[in-house]
Image (cartoon, rainbow, N blue to C red):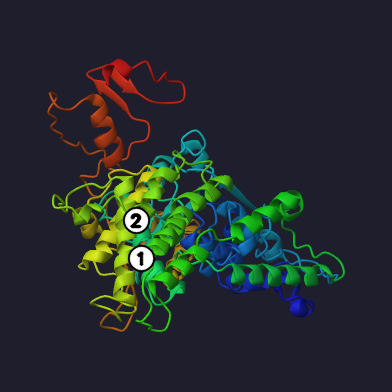
């Protein structure tokens, strides 16, 4: 990172130890005090994906020196085009570990070249209590793990920034910050739209759960490709597979993998690093060193090669060729259905068996609650079978039917054959390329339903979708946009500055975040005044919020049909988001969870 060493000789003695990028803050009336807050505050960042990478870069370049990062995910090939802290050699590694190490290298050094001058008074005050060695500490785990990430843990931080992509984790962080009375800067994006708000219980602001949240429609690529947890994740994956198999350009699908470009990128990085290491000496900037490359050795190199080797692209390209996709029209070529079935079998085996086995081998799911189960070879053999017919060709077929694994394989193979017949011969020959995904197109929905259900079977995701229900989900998804992530991450850092500045004020304004912070909307279209950002006052809490206002929720349950276990799993944990609930009837505890609680103690009540 360029640290302005060429100009350090002519700087005044009072600013000699201030990093050049931070001298603008230092020059303002409250600058020295605010800069001291920045340099000494302890920050917790939850999430190191799309928004998280932007935030880590912003935190580092803004001078924050004590940051901890929590994230559960590992790096996928699909992350490399937008999560800029990652490179091809990092595929399969924990996001928070890599992102923290890279961001640490961006932190400006505190002390520049010694010019023999004494430091000024303002600078001495600013540097009191500042860590000489910056620390960006990663925690590869689930923020919902109460044994590690609890209220005492959060109370150690000056403020918390959220960069999460799911409601359950956001609920968890929201409640932790409320209980710890630590300000939370929350952000979210949906396509071109985004918003940033500040949640602070002492200031009387609205919390994350004061308003009902709409169903999530934007999903990170890494979640879709590697760690699905909901049926909609699998349906998005099925749509991308449709694009990969039938689209005019395979590279437009998020499932596209290109070994050549990945290897070329890695070689370029290695050459660049080799060139840097050939220079004399080792540059130190007061930051803690990271030894990931040296410690991992041979295992790291083998992991890089494994992450760069695609398991299915060769088979997909072969399948497209046999279907007549992406090649010049030649309707004289006849279809060899036996050969096409065999090629389809190879492709489906690579997608639903070999790729899953590869991800398991890379320890991608070592922290997951459920480890995916690859499809069995007997089920995949249906791709080359001519004895069975797909469910949609049966007289008894209905759109509300749930297909088995074997039926999904038959349905996918039928779609491949139908596309081949339309491009290589038959009544509709010459229809190339096939139409892009359309939820009203029967073939497209058959394909996506079958592919997404196989994905759900592998990752043990319920419920399995009928074609009718999958159609409703597939037509209601918004793509994520990286630029929006960058904008809201910048707005989060500005809110962090406002929070730290408020601690320098006096009287009623001190620590009253409703006076200094704003709820900011990022808009797709301009306001009447031509603005894309719309700030408003932080809303008051919802008096009916059971999280921050202790409101009472009335619930009527038919005790003849519902068990206590059903109430716990469906309502208390899933809908209300309680992690370790305690249930009482009168003064008696009928159910309780926690570290020291025997799970069999209340099993009779469930």
Tell me the residue at 23%/77% (across/down): 427
The 10 Å Cα crowd at callout 1, few under 14, some 14 to 19, many 20 or more, is: many
Q: Secondary structure at mark 2?
A: helix
Q: Quadrant of the N terminus?
A: bottom right
| Res 62 visible | yes
The 10 Å Cα crowd at callout 2, few under 14, some 14 to 19, many 20 or more, is: many
Q: Secondary structure at mark 1?
A: helix
Q: Position of residue 184 (x, y in %)?
A: 42, 52
Residue 83, above or below 352? below
Q: Position of residue 140 (x, y in %)?
A: 56, 46
| Res 235 visible | no
Residue 271, above or below 372? below
Label 1 – label 2 distance at C-alpha: 9 Å
In the depicted view, which residue is nearer to us: 346 or 191? 346
In the depicted view, which residue is nearer to us: 178 or 250? 250
Residue 526, above or below 353? below
Residue 575, above or below 183? above
Q: Position of residue 26 (x, y in %)?
A: 61, 70
For mark 2, what is the residue?
451
Residue 17 lies left or right of residue 390; in this view the side is right
In the depicted view, which residue is nearer to us: 417 or 557? 417
Tell me the residue at 39%/75% (across/down): 324
For mark 1, what is the residue?
242
The reply to whether discs 1 and 2 touch (Cβ–Cβ < 8 Å) is yes
Q: Position of residue 286 (x, y in %)?
A: 74, 59
In the depicted view, which residue is nearer to us: 254 or 410? 410
Residue 564 lies left or right of residue 171; in this view the side is left
For residue 580, what is the image quadrant? top left
Q: Quadrant of the C terminus?
A: top left
Q: Earlier in the sequence, mark 1 or mark 2?
A: 1
Residue 157 lies left or right of residue 420; in this view the side is right
Tell me the residue at 49%/63% (across/down): 315
């Amino acid at each position: 990172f360029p640290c302005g060493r060429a100009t350090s000789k002519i700087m005044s003695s009072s600013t000699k130890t201030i990093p050049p990028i931070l001298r603008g803050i230092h020059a303002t009336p409250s600058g020295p005090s605010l800069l001291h807050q920045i340099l000494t505050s302890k920050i917790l960042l939850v999430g190191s994906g799309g928004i998280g990478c932007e935030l880590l870069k912003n935190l580092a370049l803004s001078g924050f020196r004590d940051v901890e990062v929590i994230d559960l995910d590992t790096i996928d090939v699909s992350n490399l085009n937008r999560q800029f802290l990652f490179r091809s050699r990092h595929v399969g590694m924990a996001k928070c570990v890599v992102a923290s190490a890279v961001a640490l290298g961006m932190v400006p050094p505190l002390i520049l070249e010694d010019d023999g001058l004494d430091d000024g008074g303002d600078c001495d005050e600013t540097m009191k209590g500042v860590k000489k060695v910056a620390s960006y500490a990663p925690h590869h785990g689930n923020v919902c793990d109460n044994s590690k990430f609890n209220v005492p843990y959060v109370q150690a931080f000056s403020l918390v920034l959220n960069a999460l992509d799911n409601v359950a984790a956001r609920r968890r962080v929201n409640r932790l910050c409320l209980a710890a009375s630590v300000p939370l800067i929350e952000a979210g994006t949906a396509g071109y739209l985004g918003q940033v708000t500040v949640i602070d219980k002492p200031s009387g602001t609205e919390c994350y759960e004061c308003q009902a949240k709409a169903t999530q429609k934007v999903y990170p690529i890494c979640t879709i490709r590697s760690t699905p947890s909901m049926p909609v994740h699998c349906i998005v994956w099925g749509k991308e597979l449709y694009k990969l198999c039938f689209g005019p350009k395979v590279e437009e699908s998020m499932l596209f993998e290109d070994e050549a470009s990945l290897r070329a990128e890695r070689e370029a990085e290695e050459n660049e690093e080799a060139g840097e290491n050939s220079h004399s000496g080792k540059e130190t900037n007061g930051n803690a060193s990271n030894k990931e490359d040296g410690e991992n050795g041979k295992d790291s190199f083998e992991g890089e090669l494994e992450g760069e080797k695609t398991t299915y692209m060769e088979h997909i390209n072969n399948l497209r060729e046999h279907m007549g996709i992406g090649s010049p029209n030649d309707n004289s070529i006849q279809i060899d259905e036996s050969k096409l079935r065999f090629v389809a079998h190879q492709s489906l085996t690579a997608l639903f068996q070999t790729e899953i086995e590869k991800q398991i081998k890379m320890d991608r799911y070592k922290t997951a609650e459920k480890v995916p189960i690859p499809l069995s070879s007997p089920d995949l053999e249906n791709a080359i079978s001519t004895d069975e017919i797909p469910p949609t060709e049966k007289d008894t077929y209905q759109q509300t039917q749930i297909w088995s694994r074997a039926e999904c394989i038959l349905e996918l193979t039928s779609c491949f054959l139908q596309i081949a017949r339309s491009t290589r011969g038959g009544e509709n020959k010459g229809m190339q390329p096939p139409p892009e995904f359309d939820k009203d197109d029967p073939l497209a929905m058959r394909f996506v339903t079958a592919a997404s259900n196989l994905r759900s079977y592998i990752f043990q995701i319920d419920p399995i979708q009928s074609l009718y229900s999958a159609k409703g989900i597939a037509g209601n998804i918004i793509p994520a946009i990286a630029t929006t992530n960058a904008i809201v991450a910048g707005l989060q850092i500005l809110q962090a500055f406002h929070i730290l500045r408020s601690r320098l004020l006096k009287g009623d304004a001190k620590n009253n975040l409703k006076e200094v912070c704003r709820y900011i909307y990022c808009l797709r279209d301009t306001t009447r005044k031509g603005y894309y950002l719309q700030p408003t006052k932080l809303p008051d809490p919802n008096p009916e919020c059971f999280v921050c206002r202790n409101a009472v929720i009335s619930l009527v349950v038919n005790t003849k049909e519902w068990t206590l276990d059903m109430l716990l799993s469906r309502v208390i944990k899933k809908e209300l988001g309680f992690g370790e609930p305690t249930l009482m009837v009168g003064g008696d505890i009928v159910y309780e969870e926690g570290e020291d609680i025997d799970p069999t103690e209340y099993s009779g009540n469930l």
